[in-house]
Image (cartoon, rainbow, N blue to C red):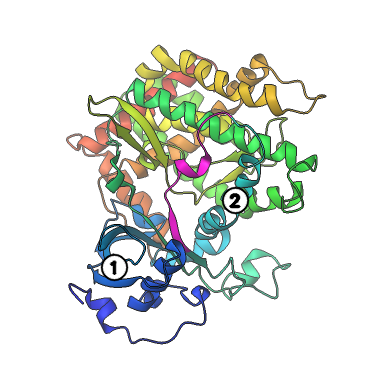
């Protein structure tokens, strides 16, 4: 059979009732892989030739979202021109930490990603198959998925007391379980940009253009589906919003706890960098203004162009492809665990504030916003309802309004996503332990990750106080 992983070698064959029986990584035995590929390729004579080892490919702190492995599988195909064909898989499953598993019972990020691949891309196909839509098809901007299962998606983790307060049913509810088998897009020449470096302008402009296509397509879908122009298979507006109202799952006290931790971290960074001159305004923002804007953070404020947002759109979730001359020519978007429903400014500013720095924004932000608007407006001009009035001035006004939301998100996330310290949160005091480790890293003046975190956070504070946003 060739080189076979110890995990798969130990699995005993049991006839599958269907692909729905492949529910976790433990079910991914040789026969399961064979049947997944038979279903995907349509070749019922396909047989495995070799199955490689499962190899961990999680980066630092990636386990907050998923456990990620890679695997190489070679098959013999009846319909293939060559005798053999190799598939390169990325396999995702929910994290193992008890603390993260508990929080995911509320936020359900793995369910979000499974819903994206099993439902939302299918809904988008209703638009793309019936309308002349600008830009590349959305599925071409995503990895190919061979199999997806979530116990929350299938209803296996349903709770009979879901109408009760979350703290009643949370201990009783089963944790997220499932598996995603998708292509490794690195094998198609896509690569991740170094998250410790500011995204170059050419990369940023391409990514922001494709983000505008992403938002615009979902706007077109939303409007045409509501008008009954996409057929009976299209979701109602209520179904669409219910699948994407992910921020509303989180209790307000969790946001308040996060804000308290973020305020403390930002305050200490400003002290370490000798920027007490702006510290008072930042403190006031976290103690007063951000509490008043909690409804926006929770997705309770609506706008005329609310759409499907990626929710975690930054350089670490964008794969770039370059041509033979080194020019970046294409992107693939990954990690749809934080999809949500809201204003596009959420994603746009998230990318600006996490993937760039103050110098980049001062030089290029206005032009990049023009690039984004020029693409988004193609969808508004073609698909918006006749009674909808929304222009560039309204868009830029919303950008200003959402800067405080993006500032909160960025200052909360930067100390984690740029951290070089592996955080393994577990147990009742996990959140406190995570904050302790992050604080210790920031205190080290020689730590290169600490230097970059502080540089970017100070730049954000300087920019938003300078521009009277906070």
Residue 66: percent from the left, percent from the top?
Answer: 40, 59
- Mark 2 or 1, which is nearer the eye? 1
Between the C-alphas of marks 2 and 1, the distance is 32 Å
Q: How many other residues sit within 10 Å of disc 1, few (<14), some (14-19) or many (≥20)?
A: some
* Region rendered in magenta: 134-147
Q: Quadrant of the C terminus?
A: top right
In the picture, measured across the screen, residue 293 lies left or right of residue 135, that is right
Answer whether residue 292 is magenta in the image.
no
Answer whether residue 143 is magenta in the image.
yes
Circle nearer the N terminus (2, 1): 1
Q: Residue at x 63, y 49 (%)?
A: 123
Q: Residue 120, labelled with which disc? A: 2
Residue 283: percent from the left, percent from the top?
Answer: 50, 30
Q: Which residue is under mark 1? A: 76
Of 449 and 335, nearer the camera is 335
At mark 1, the secondary structure is strand
In the picture, measured across the screen, residue 26 lies left or right of residue 451, that is right
Of 139 and 27, nearer the camera is 139
Q: How many other residues sit within 10 Å of disc 2, few (<14), some (14-19) or many (≥20)?
A: some
Q: Residue at x 46, y 38 (%)?
A: 313
Q: Is residue 250 visible?
A: no
Residue 152: percent from the left, percent from the top?
Answer: 57, 67
In the picture, measured across the screen, residue 112 lies left or right of residue 11, that is right
Residue 315: percent from the left, percent from the top?
Answer: 37, 36
At mark 2, the secondary structure is helix
In the picture, measured across the screen, residue 434 lies left or right of residue 176, that is left
Q: Do callouts 2 and 1 mark residues in contact (Cβ within 8 Å)?
A: no
Tally the marks: 2
Q: Quadrant of the N terminus?
A: bottom left
Q: Is residue 302 visible?
A: yes
Examine the image and state in which quarter residue 307 appears. Answer: top right
């Amino acid at each position: 059979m060739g080189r076979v992983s110890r995990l798969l070698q130990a699995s005993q064959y049991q006839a599958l009732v269907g692909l729905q029986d492949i529910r976790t990584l433990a079910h991914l035995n040789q026969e399961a892989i064979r049947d997944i590929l038979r279903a995907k390729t349509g070749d019922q004579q396909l047989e495995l030739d070799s199955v490689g080892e499962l190899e961990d490919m999680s980066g630092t702190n990636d386990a907050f979202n998923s456990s990620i492995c890679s695997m190489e599988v070679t098959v013999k195909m009846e319909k293939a021109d060559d005798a053999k064909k190799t598939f390169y898989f990325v396999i995702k499953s929910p994290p193992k930490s008890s603390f993260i598993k508990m929080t995911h019972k509320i936020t359900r990020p793995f369910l979000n990603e499974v819903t994206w691949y099993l439902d939302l891309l299918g809904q988008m196909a209703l638009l793309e198959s019936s309308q002349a839509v600008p830009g590349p098809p959305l599925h071409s901007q995503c990895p190919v998925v061979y199999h997806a299962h979530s116990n929350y998606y299938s209803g296996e983790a349903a709770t009979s007391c879901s109408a009760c307060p979350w703290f009643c049913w949370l201990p009783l509810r089963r944790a997220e379980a499932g598996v995603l088998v998708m292509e490794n897009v690195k094998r198609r020449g896509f690569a991740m940009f170094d998250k410790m470096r500011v995204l170059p302008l050419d990369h940023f402009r391409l990514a922001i253009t494709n983000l505008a296509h992403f938002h615009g397509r979902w706007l077109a879908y939303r409007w045409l589906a509501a008008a009954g122009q996409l057929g009976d298979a299209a979701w109602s507006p209520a179904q669409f919003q219910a699948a994407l109202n992910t921020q509303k799952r989180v209790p307000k006290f969790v946001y308040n706890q996060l804000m308290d931790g973020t305020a403390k971290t930002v305050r200490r960074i400003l002290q370490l960098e000798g920027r007490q001159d702006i510290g008072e305004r930042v403190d006031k923002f976290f103690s007063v203004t951000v509490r008043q804007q909690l409804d926006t953070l929770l997705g309770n404020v609506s706008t005329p162009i609310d759409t499907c947002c990626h929710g975690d759109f930054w350089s670490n979730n964008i794969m770039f492809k370059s041509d033979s001359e080194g020019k970046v020519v294409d992107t693939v978007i990954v990690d749809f665990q934080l999809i949500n429903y809201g204003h596009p400014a959420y994603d746009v500013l998230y990318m600006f504030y996490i993937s760039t720095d103050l110098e980049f924004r001062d030089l290029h932000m206005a032009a990049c916003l023009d690039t984004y608007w020029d693409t988004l407006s193609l969808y508004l001009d073609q698909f918006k309802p006749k009674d909808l009035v929304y222009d560039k001035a309204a868009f830029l006004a919303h950008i200003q309004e959402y800067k405080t939301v993006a500032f909160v998100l960025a200052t909360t996330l930067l100390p984690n996503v740029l951290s070089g310290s592996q955080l393994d949160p577990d147990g009742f005091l996990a959140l406190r332990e995570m904050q302790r480790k992050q604080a210790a890293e920031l205190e080290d003046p020689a730590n290169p990750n600490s230097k970059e975190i502080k540089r970017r956070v100070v730049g954000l504070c300087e920019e938003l106080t300078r521009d009277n946003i906070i």
